[in-house]
Image (cartoon, rainbow, N blue to C red):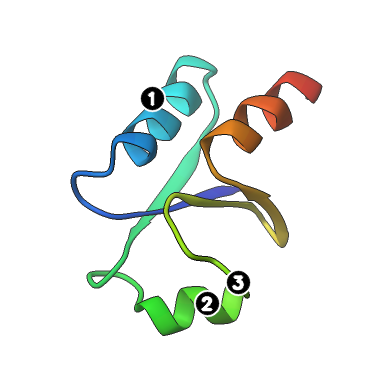
Amino acid sequence: MITVYSRPGCKWCESSKTLLELKGVEFNELMLDVDITVDQLKTLVPGAKSVPQIMDDDIHIGGYKELTEYLDKK
């Protein structure tokens, strides 16, 4: 299951979720400072400095650009 770690008002977060919806891919969204803290995200994705951060189960995909590449390979 894909998880999108996002923040309200984030253009790339919205674009990532829209892309997943258009491709018919189910996903969960976790919002920073609502569902997860920045420290928790950094534990899951060491070195994360921006959102979105996208995971497929335990596989770190990256951000929007990496998501487009990842979905093209599937």
| Cα–Cα span, label 3 and label 1 | 25 Å
| Cα–Cα span, label 2 and label 3 | 6 Å
Mark 2–mark 3 CB contact (< 8 Å): yes
Question: Which residue is denoted by mark 3 in the rendering?
Answer: 47
Q: Residue at x 52, y 20 (%)?
A: 24
Callout 2: few (<14), some (14-19), or many (20+) C-alpha neighbours within 10 Å? few
> Does 30 appear above or below 18?
below
Q: Secondary structure at mark 2?
A: helix
Q: Residue at x 70, y 27 (%)?
A: 69
Q: Going by the picture, which residue comes out furthest to the top?
A: 22
User: Residue type at mark 2?
Assistant: Lys
Residue 14 pos. (x, y %): 32, 34
Question: Which residue is denoted by mark 2 in the rendering?
Answer: 42
Q: Residue at x 44, y 58 (%)?
A: 50
Residue 10 pos. (x, y %): 27, 44
Label whose residue precedes the other's in the sequence (2 or 1): 1
Residue 70 pos. (x, y %): 72, 32
Question: Which residue is denoted by mark 1 in the rendering?
Answer: 18
